[in-house]
Amino acid sequence: MLTFSNLLEKTIHSMAAVAVVFVIVAFSHGQAQAQLASVQPDKLKNIDVDEHLGQAIPLDLHFTNDAGEYLPLENYFHQEKPVILVLAYYECPMLCTLVLNGLADGIKQLDWLPGKQYQVLTVSIDPIETPELALAKGKNYIQATGKSGIDEGWRFFVGKEDQIKALTDAVGFKYFYDDKQKQFAHPAVLMVLTEDGKISRYLYGIEYKKQDLRLALLEASLGKIGNTLDKIILYCYHYDSDAGGYALIAVNVMKLGGGLTLLILVVFLAALWAREHRKNPRHAVAL
């Protein structure tokens, strides 16, 4: 259920995602008023996410990774693990840094490891950025996770403009280049995809809670990762778009509680019958 606090939090995050791109850059150039005027109101509609849940991205698109390898996205899918896709650019003055820092912090909190239980792909939306820049940025963010040996699990890419446009269109990521500020204006969002490239979930904002990341990955994996407890937890939660995260489903909790109660009752009666049978095998009452 959407509460006032959730609505307020979502509103603040939405406003921040748009405002931070322009306000911070504007102050850095000493042109706050002129810059804000240049993006209102017609250009603001170009910063958005048109969700394409359930649709597949084109896996034949080619990008150059942080090792300088020119490869299709196909190489990072069909490995029985979900994929987190981040669209950003490496020389972004503020928002991309916040998004990637938020993701690195979320990964740090997870027990699961990139490359083992899931894959992370960061693709630059700036066609002039280089693999060398991607490598340098990648090392910083991977180090920030505090986890070793995940270089193959979180890869950073650059690409040609037509390939970038095809990918952003496929996931509904709307952005534009501000000629005056020489910066990209874009939303703050992660996409979680299934192993075959279908869009399973969008996670918005600049902070990604451990629970939200875990449940989104579990959901996208169709239960292939995680233990039995994780799957039970997923049964009790659903994604609440109004709240911007996973919320408890009271009905499913009640169903689960009822099932557990019945199971406990059956086990108790079975134990009682077994004890009675041992005491008096001839007169034990069959259940």
Image (cartoon, rainbow, N blue to C red):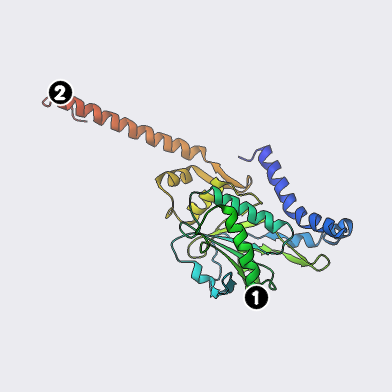
Identity of the residue drawn at 33% across and 35% down: 263
Within 10 Å of the Cα at label 2, are there few (<14), some (14-19), or many (20+) other Cα atoms? few
Camera-nearest label, 2 or 1: 1
Q: Earlier in the sequence, mark 2 or mark 1?
A: 1
Left or right: 172 in relation to 232: right
Left or right: 19 in relation to 61: right
- Specify the farthest residue to the left: 282
Image label count = 2
Left or right: 167 in relation to 77: right
Q: Residue 211 is drawn in which quadrant?
A: top right
Callout 2–callout 1 Cβ contact below 8 Å: no
Q: Report the Cα–Cα distance between label 2 and label 1.
A: 80 Å
Which residue type does callout 2 highlight?
Answer: Lys
Is disc 1 placed on a helix, strand or loop? loop
Within 10 Å of the Cα at label 1, are there few (<14), some (14-19), or many (20+) other Cα atoms? some
Identity of the residue drawn at 51% across and 59% down: 150
Tag 2 residue? 279
Q: Where is residue 48 shown, x and y percent of the image?
A: 70, 59
Tag 1 residue? 160
212 and 198: which one is in front? Answer: 212
Quadrant for the N terminus in the image: top right
Q: Where is residue 73 shown, x and y percent of the image?
A: 54, 70
Identity of the residue drawn at 63% across and 40% down: 2
Q: Where is residue 32 shown, x and y percent of the image?
A: 86, 56
Which mark is drawn over residue 64?
none
Look at the picture and state if 208 lies above or below 129: above
Q: Where is residue 170 shown, x and y percent of the image?
A: 61, 67
Is disc 2 placed on a helix, strand or loop? helix
Q: Is residue 112 visible?
A: yes
Quadrant for the C terminus in the image: top left
152 and 149: which one is in front? Answer: 149
